[in-house]
Amino acid sequence: MPGEMKAPLYRLRGTVVHGKGKGHTVGMPTANLQPSPGQTLPEEGVYAALAEVEGQTYRAVTNVGPRPSVDSDSRETVESLLLGYTGDLYGKEMELAFYRRLRGIEKFPSLQAVKEQVDRDGMAVNDFFDRQGGVR
């Protein structure tokens, strides 16, 4: 029996900006959020989140922190795969509501291995929101 959605652990708002575009090469396009000034990022890791953009809400796999499998840059990023979304988000305002930390940051041997893990993370996100009675 689905439960009631609890309040999110964290919220971030900002603009979707261009990343390196590597996710597109394996069918995993992500939205890179440039948080609005003054916001503090949550703990590094991968989260079950809801992304709101242009009045629509999508389930999302969101990575907060560096991307050691993609590049050697240690800067903090906020990168989301919006489940079921197709289109162009560049330049649009997006709000992320973080509901559950799924795992820590990991380094994978290839971009394909990253995609396989993100696919598993997507299943975990769907399972989490299905149990919570959350957005479809």
Image (cartoon, helix red, strand yellow):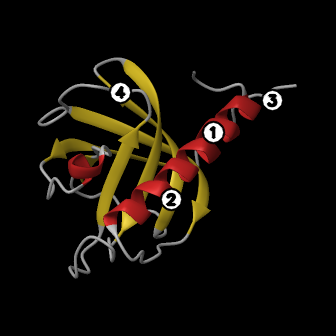
Residue 7, numbered label: 1
| Position in image of residue 27 (x %, y %) | 30, 43
Instruction: Farthest residue to the right: give it.
Output: 1
Q: 30 or 95: nearer the eye?
A: 30
Q: Which is in the foreground here, disc 2 or disc 3?
A: 2
Residue at 65% from the left image edge and 34% from the top image edge:
129
Numbered circle sitting on residue 117: 2
Marks 1, 2: nearer the viewer: 2
Q: Which amino acid is tagged 3?
A: Gly
Identify which amino acid the numbered label 4 is placed on.
Answer: Tyr
Question: Which one is earlier in the sequence, the residue at label 4 or at label 1?
Answer: 1
Q: Nearer the viewer, mark 4 or mark 2?
A: 2
Residue 25 in percent (x, y) is at 21, 50
Answer with left or right where residue 101 lies relative to residue 65: right
**Marks 2 and 3, how far apart at CA:** 27 Å
Q: Secondary structure at mark 1?
A: loop
Q: Pick whichever of labels 3 and 4 is earlier in the sequence.
A: 3
Residue holding disc 4: 85
Q: In front here: 30 or 39?
A: 30
How packed mark 2 is, by other alpha carbons closer than 10 Å (few <14, some 14-19, many 20 or more), is: some
Q: Which residue is mark 3?
A: 3
> In the rendered view, does 4 fall on the left or right side of 28?
right
Earlier sequence position, callout 2 versus callout 3: 3
**What secondary structure is marked by label 2?**
helix
Q: Dot 4: what SS?
A: loop
Q: Is residue 100 left or right of residue 110?
A: right
Contact flag, marks 2 and 3 (Cβ < 8 Å) = no
Identify the amino acid type marked 1: Ala
**Structural distance between the alpha carbons of marks 3 and 4:** 25 Å
